[in-house]
Amino acid sequence: MALKIYTRTGDKGKTSLIGGTKVPKSHIRIESYGTVDELNSYIGLLNDHLNDSHTKDVLKEVQDRLFTIGSSLACDPEKEPLMKIPDLKEEDITFLEKEIDKMNEVLPAMKYFILPGGHVAVSTAHVTRCVCRRAERICVQMQEEGMFVEPIVIKYINRLSDYLFVVARYAAHLFKVEEVAWKPRV
């Protein structure tokens, strides 16, 4: 028999963290991993708009790391040490940095602020970056409110937003579209 997608357990606005702790669906911990899930979905959409196989492969790796992050955020931190949750590693951050550096080697130096636009892949990368920054803000807020968040999670999400910004620029380069420069009114 197939597993049912609906359980009805959340019909009254509560859900369970990994470990069984019940919390309201409006809890910031739910918001954090929900936003990471949204980010993961946007990365999938971005990937669908790209034609560069290397970048597509990197984004698949990022999606895997985001599932790891979502698992970490979905845990009751007091029960998590007893569970086997996949780990995020410092090498995951170094990997993003190396990818940023590789793309920047072929990109022109930035001489102005860039507006999202020019190609659907570029715009999608910028939307994805914005969702990433929101995920980061939520995790930082949790930390500031005394809720445990692995410090490496915040570090990874921060670096990922940098990576996504460069992917937006790189996509413009690959699709041979001019970046949209912000020209402020004076």
Image (cartoon, rainbow, N blue to C red):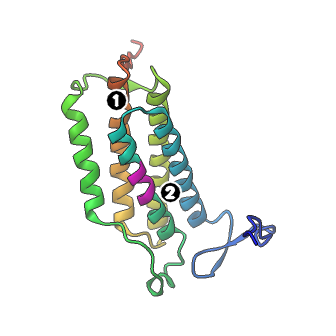
Near-viewer residue (167 or 35): 167
What residue range appears in magenta?
A: 60-65
Give the CA separation, mark 2 to mark 1. 26 Å
> Which residue lies at the image location 69% right of the left edge and 71% below the top edge?
15
Mark identifier at residue 169: 1
Q: Around disc 2, counting alpha carbons within 10 Å, would you say few (fewer than 14), some (14 to 19), or many (20 or more)?
A: many
Residue nearest the observer in this picture, 92 or 133: 92
| Residue at 37% over, 29% down | 171
Tell me if residue 145 comes above or below residue 35 in the rendering.
below
* Residue farthest toward the front in the current orientation of the protein: 1
Asked where in the image residue 163 lies, by quadrant, the reply is: top left
The residue at 54%/78% (across/down) is 76
| Horizontal arrangement in the rendering, residue 22 relative to residue 147 (left or right) | right
Quarter holding the C terminus is top left
Residue 82 shown left or right of residue 179 in the figure: right
Relative placement, left or right, of 184 versus 76 is: left
Position above or below: 44 against 117: below
Residue 114, position as x, y percentages in the image: 37, 25
Q: Position of residue 96 (x, y in %)?
A: 29, 50
Q: Which mark is residue 138?
A: 2
Q: Secondary structure at mark 2?
A: helix
**Quadrant occupied by the N terminus:** bottom right
Name the residue furthest top.
186
Whether the magenta-drawn stretch holds residue 62 is answered as yes
Disc 1 marks a residue whose amino acid type is Arg
Q: Is residue 91 above or below residue 132?
A: below
Q: Label the magenta part by its dominant secondary structure.
A: helix
Q: Amino acid at mark 2?
A: Ile
Q: Can the viewer see residue 27?
A: yes
